[in-house]
Image: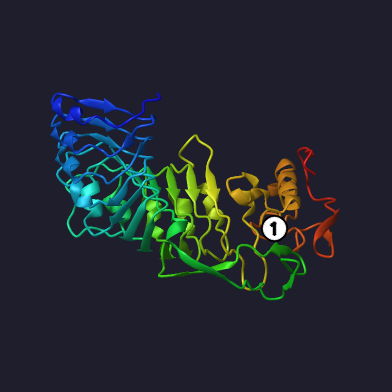
C-alpha cells in the first residue's frame, strides 16, 4: 500500500484487536506506546516503513504477542533483551535493519530460545555469543539471524546441543563495526610477486585479498568448531566477513546433511580446501552453494588448487576461478569419467583431488609445466565415449 502519516495512538483503545498489519507503507514517526494496552494482540507487523525514534520498552507488556515485526525501519537507541523475557513463545521477533543497539550477555540465547525466528541483522549488536548457564525453558529456535552486527569472540562450543532445531544461522560480520587495515601480502615460497600476481613454476595466483588486521578482534575469531557439523537440520549457515583462522574441518563433510548454503567467505582460513565438502547437503534436493572466496588457501610451497570434486559439481563459488579450478583439469576429469578411468591399466594421479595435470598425471605432458600439450594413453584399457569437453 501507500499509507502515509503516523501510527494512530487511538489503536490502544481497541483492546480486542488481535492483528495489526501495516507493512510496506510510508508510515513515519514514533511507535506509539499506547500499543502496549492491547493485551490480546497476537500479530503486529509494521516492517518496511519509515518509523523513527526508540523501540518502546512498554511493548514488553504484550504478553500475547506471537509475531512482532519492525524490520526495515529507522529505529534508534538501546534495547535490552530482558524486554522480551516475559513474552510467550513467539513465532517471530523481527527488528533487523534499523540502527538499534543491543548488548549480548549469557542470557541472550536463554531468552530467545522460546522464539522460532529471531531476525536482528543490520543493527549494532555487541558482545560475545555465550552458552547460558541454565538450560533454557524452551527449545523452539529455528532461525537465528544476527548478521551484519558487531558480535565478537570465539564461536561457542556445543551450540548444536542448545539449539538442535536450528535451520538457519547467520553470524556474518558487519563492516561498520570493524577497525581494520591492510597489511602486505607475501607470496608463497618459490613464488615471485609480479603485476599483482604471485608467479611460480606452474601457477599464477592473484594477490587477493590483502591480509587484513582487525583491532579489538571485532567479529568471530579463532578456529571453526568441529562439533558444528552436528547441526542436523541446518540449511543455511553464514559466517562471512569474520576473522576465523586455521583450516576448514574435514568433519563438515560428514555432517550438514540438509545444508543448502554455506558461506565461509572473507575470513582467514588457510591450508587445503577439504574435498570432503563435496558430501555436504546430500540429504536435500536443492542445489548446494558453498562460498569460500576471500580466504588464504595455499600451502607453504605451492598454490593449492581447490578439490576437483568441488570444482566439477560447481558447489563452490571458486569453480570459475582458473587459479583454484583450472579448466583443463575439469575437462580431463570429465574425460576420465566418460572413458571409465577406474578401469584403466594406469590412472596414476588422475583421481587425485589436488594435483594439477602437469604434476605427474599418467600420460599427460605439458609445456613449461603450465599447459597440457600431449595426452598419450595408448593401450590403457580406455572404453566408453569421447565427450565434447576434451
Question: Can residue 157 be spotted in the picture?
Answer: no
Give the class, few, some or many, for how many residues have Cα within 10 Å of label 1's Cα (few <14, many ≥20).
some
Question: Can residue 333 be spotted in the picture?
Answer: yes
Which residue is at a point 48% across and 52% down the rendered structure image? 253
Q: In which quadrant is the N terminus drawn?
A: top left
Query: Residue 144 placed where, x, y %?
Result: 34, 46
Q: Is residue 160 left or right of residue 195?
A: left
Q: Which type of secondary structure does the marked residue at label 1 adopt?
A: loop
Which residue is at a point 80% across and 61% down the rendered structure image? 370
Q: Name the quadrant containing residue 32.
A: top left
Q: Name the quadrant containing residue 193.
A: bottom right
- Between 98 and 384, the one nearer to me in the picture: 98
- Between 106 and 150, the one nearer to me in the picture: 150
Which residue is at a point 19% across and 48% down the rendered structure image? 83
Q: Is residue 342 above or below residue 222?
A: above
Q: Is residue 55 above or below residue 191?
A: above
Q: How is the image coloured?
A: rainbow
Residue underneath mark 1 = 323
- Between 342 and 310, the one nearer to me in the picture: 310
Query: Residue 166 placed where, x, y %?
Result: 34, 45
Q: Is residue 139 left or right of residue 273?
A: left
Query: Residue 373 placed where, x, y %?
Result: 86, 55
- Between 129 and 230, the one nearer to me in the picture: 129
Q: In which quadrant is the C terminus drawn?
A: top right
Amino acid at each position: 500500500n501507500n499509507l502515509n502519516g503516523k501510527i494512530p495512538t487511538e489503536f490502544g483503545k481497541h483492546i480486542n484487536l488481535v492483528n495489526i498489519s501495516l507493512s510496506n507503507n510510508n508510515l513515519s514517526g514514533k511507535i506509539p506506546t499506547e500499543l502496549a494496552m492491547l493485551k490480546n494482540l497476537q500479530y503486529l507487523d509494521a516492517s518496511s516503513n519509515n518509523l523513527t525514534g526508540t523501540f518502546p520498552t512498554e511493548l514488553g507488556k504484550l504478553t500475547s504477542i506471537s509475531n512482532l515485526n519492525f524490520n526495515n525501519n529507522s529505529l534508534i537507541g538501546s534495547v535490552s533483551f530482558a524486554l522480551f523475557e516475559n513474552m510467550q513463545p513467539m513465532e517471530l521477533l523481527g527488528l533487523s535493519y534499523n540502527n538499534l543497539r543491543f548488548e549480548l550477555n549469557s542470557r541472550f540465547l536463554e531468552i530467545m530460545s522460546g522464539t522460532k525466528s529471531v531476525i536482528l541483522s543490520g543493527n549494532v549488536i555487541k558482545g560475545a555469543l555465550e552458552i547460558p548457564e541454565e538450560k533454557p525453558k524452551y527449545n523452539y529456535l529455528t532461525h537465528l539471524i544476527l548478521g551484519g552486527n558487531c558480535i565478537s569472540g570465539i564461536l561457542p562450543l556445543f551450540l548444536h546441543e542448545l539449539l538442535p532445531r536450528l535451520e538457519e544461522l547467520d553470524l556474518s560480520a558487519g563492516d561498520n563495526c570493524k577497525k581494520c587495515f591492510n597489511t602486505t601480502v607475501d607470496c608463497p615460497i618459490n613464488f615471485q610477486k609480479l603485476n599483482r600476481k604471485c608467479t611460480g613454476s606452474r601457477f599464477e595466483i592473484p594477490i587477493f585479498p590483502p591480509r587484513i588486521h582487525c583491532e579489538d578482534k571485532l567479529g568471530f575469531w579463532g578456529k571453526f568448531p568441529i562439533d558444528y557439523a552436528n547441526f542436523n537440520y541446518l540449511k543455511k549457515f553464514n559466517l562471512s566477513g569474520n576473522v576465523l583462522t586455521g583450516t576448514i574441518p574435514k568433519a563438515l563433510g560428514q555432517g550438514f546433511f540438509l545444508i543448502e548454503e554455506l558461506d565461509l567467505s572473507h575470513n582467514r582460513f588457510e591450508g587445503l580446501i577439504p574435498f570432503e565438502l563435496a558430501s555436504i547437503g546430500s540429504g536435500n534436493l536443492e542445489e548446494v552453494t558453498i562460498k569460500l572466496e576471500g580466504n588464504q588457501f595455499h600451502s607453504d610451497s605451492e598454490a593449492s588448487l581447490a578439490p576437483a570434486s568441488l570444482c566439477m559439481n560447481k558447489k563452490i563459488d571458486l569453480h570459475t576461478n582458473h587459479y583454484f579450478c583450472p579448466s583443463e583439469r575439469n575437462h580431463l576429469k570429465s574425460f576420465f569419467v566418460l572413458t571409465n578411468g577406474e578401469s584403466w591399466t594406469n590412472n596414476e594421479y588422475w583421481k587425485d583431488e589436488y594435483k594439477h595435470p602437469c604434476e605427474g598425471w599418467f600420460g599427460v605432458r605439458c609445456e613449461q609445466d603450465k599447459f597440457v600439450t600431449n595426452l598419450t594413453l595408448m593401450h590403457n584399457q580406455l572404453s566408453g565415449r569421447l565427450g565434447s569437453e576434451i
